[in-house]
Image (spheres, rainbow, N blue to C red):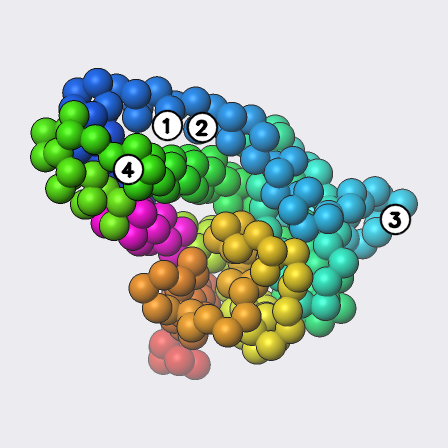
Amino acid sequence: MNYAKTALLLAAMTALFLTAGYLLGGAGGALIALLVALGMNGWAWWNSDRMALRMHNAEPVTPAGAPELYEMTERLAANAGLPMPALYIIHSDQPNAFATGRDPDNAAVAATTGLIRLLTKPELEGVIAHELAHIRNRDTLIMTIAASIAGAVGFLAQFALFFRNDRGPMGAVGAILVMILAPLAATVVQMTISRTREYAADRAGAEICGDPLALAGALRKIAGFAGRIEMPSAERNPASAHLFIMNPLTGRGADKLFSTHPNPENRIAALEEMAGRSLIERRSRVPRRPGSTPWA
């Protein structure tokens, strides 16, 4: 269901972009808009990992530099059926992490020093597993496409503002509609895609690490600190907020219209429910002695 919803949202984003191009310049405008979108997507797809890591001054981690973290990531990547991603550290007191890269063979996971200090080993495994789930689900590619189309819609809105003309089917009215409504709609769709992928990564990450409650505990701790500790690199680059496991921007509600992430409590509740189902399934598989009651 999440994959179908994501596909529909990406289709809506693309349709919005083509509609904006059509309103500005007719069929020719829609074609130009499509070519611009393809070019931006291709460039962003190829450079997304380097761009994101540079934004946050991430430093590469070697097996010798952080042996426990490296071994943990390597083991969880094997559990997920993935090659070992490049591993990075961000020097920030805010506990957070993100994954990036165009495909599993060119992926990276970055964690902050605050995250490593705050979490227990099982909780840290849950967070790393969540990021590996994003890589396995190709969420880094999906969000790169969504972000680049949203950026292209914003470019069209600026074009409408500075080069308004009457060549579109609705003339000046169409240009005004694009200028006002298109960026707003693109932002809403982009944020909805991001929220959808977070729930899917929570579920898959819990399966990879084998402990939904550990990931739930990590989310609870991160949510308690992330909103109070500023991450300067995220504040300078708010467009990268959707990459992180928890919204890194301070002073923003978690489930408002323009939030990049679902409410943390909703995510924690979903993981706790998942843990409860797993416990029931394990108990149902335990053979019972003849004549014993199910709860004996």
Residue 104: image quadrant is: top right
Q: Could you tell me residue 259's position as x and y percent?
A: 40, 62
Mark 2 belongs to which amino acid? Met
> Nearer the observer, disc 4 or disc 1?
4
Residue holding disc 1: 37
Mark 2 lies on residue: 40
Q: Secondary structure at mark 3?
A: loop
- According to the picture, the residue beneath numbered tag 4 turns out to be 160
Of the residues shown, which amino acid type is indicated by label 1? Ala
- Mark 2 Cα shell of 10 Å, populated few (<14), some (14-19), many (≥20): some
Q: Mark 3 belongs to which amino acid?
A: Gly
Q: CA distance from mark 1 to mark 3?
A: 41 Å
In this view, the residue farthest toward the right is 64
Q: Secondary structure at mark 4?
A: helix
Q: Is residue 75 visible?
A: no
Give the mark nearest the N terminus, 4 or 1.
1
Q: Nearer the viewer, mark 1 or mark 3?
A: 1
